Image (cartoon, rainbow, N blue to C red):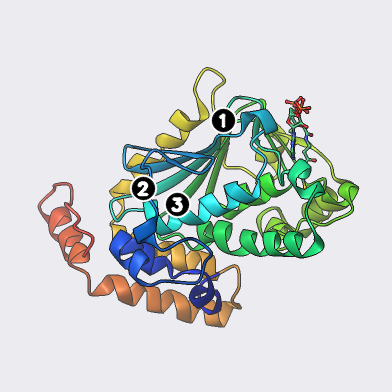
Amino acid sequence: MEGSDRGKNRAPESAGRGLAASHANGAADDSPPASRRVHDPSAEGPLGLKRQDGALIISIEREERRNALSQAALEAFGAVFRYHLAPDDRAVIITGSGARAFCAGADLKERRGMSLDEVRAQLLRYRTDLAWLSTCPVPTIAAINGATLGGGLELALLCDLRVAAPHASFALPETSLGIIPAAGGTQSLPRIVGSAKARELILLGSRVSAAEALRIGLIHRICDAAVSVVDDALTWIAPITRGAPLAQRAALRALRAADRLDIDAGLEFERACYEECLTSEDRIEALNAFAEKREPIFKGR
Ligand code: COA
């Protein structure tokens, strides 16, 4: 998603530079100018927002439709990136409201009334308003609190890390609805679980449990039933914040490049990412802290 897609979707770096920069760059979208919009820091459309321990937590608040992605929800995801992601955020956590579903995919009731062109436009929104997650300058975490179906699973696949509640389940049932997973699912799933498992999940529409998802590498861990999955996800923030911010960002860029580059180009890209860290103050601070037997104090420079 980096490289050629960066210009189209929003530069991850511009988000990292903060709200002023992201307002100023004026990338194409259908939102009114920022000056005419008021952004409630606790909500954006059907998304609830809060900050805890350095993480921006985004919750899809559509429990009555099992957190299905409506047009408004997709637009709200884009607006979160444009207006709410702050330079101090060290991670983004996405979850769903209630315990039944993380996200039941596209809002099938809304879609029933949509024209072909509206469906096409909605598909593009997955590539813009949602896909920023795969270029986000900080790690993104899916805190999976229940059923994760169709576009909901594709949303989780856009994240860097996935933790699930023990009762969560996963499926891409699109072909049974006469479509295919086209919010990136046919491309990202084989990269994550391998082509054989991806074929099984997409062609058979198989629903897998959290235990099976862990076994095949679809998720990173299952939280304890007695713990909220968001609280469990928050335990990842401490190790994330122990990393120097510039190094974390460079590591993310290099890892994501591995999904789209061949090995030679990937190694070259990795070297360029290393170079960005090499000249940073934080690298010197880490060496000094090691010599002085203390914790480094990173400044993100
Ligand atoms: N779009 C719109 N509404 C949805 C929805 C979706 N993707 N998924 C669920 N809902 C609605 C249901 O229609 C129902 O509405 P109603 O109360 O007006 O009848 C409500 O959410 C609750 O659904 P229900 O099936 O009763 O909840 P559940 O907790 O027993 O099961 C799911 C939850 C997600 C497992 C189940 O709803 C389901 O399989 N949904 C279909 C999801 C799907 O096929 N997604 C792929 C999209 S490509």
Q: Amino acid at mark 3?
A: Val
Q: Is residue 154 above or below residue 95?
A: below
Mark 2 vs mark 3: give the one in front.
Answer: 3
Secondary structure of the residue carrying numbered label 3 = helix
**Label 2 residue near ligand 1, CB within 8 Å:** no
Q: Amino acid at mark 1?
A: Ser
* Inter-mark Cα distance, 2 to 3: 21 Å
Bin the neighbour count of mark 3 within 10 Å (Cα to Cα): few under 14, some 14-19, many 20 and up: many
Q: Nearer the viewer, residue 12 or 30?
A: 30
Tell me: 78 left or right of 171.
left
* Inter-mark Cα distance, 2 to 1: 25 Å
* Inter-mark Cα distance, 3 to 1: 17 Å
Residue at 61% of width from left, 42% of height from top?
219
Residue at 54% of width from left, 23% of height from top?
224
Residue at 67% of width from left, 32% of height from top?
66
Q: Which mark is residue 80?
A: 3
Residue 83 x/y as whole percent: 39, 55
Q: Residue furthest top?
A: 226
Q: Is residue 189 above or below residue 43?
A: below
Q: Which residue is mark 2?
A: 240
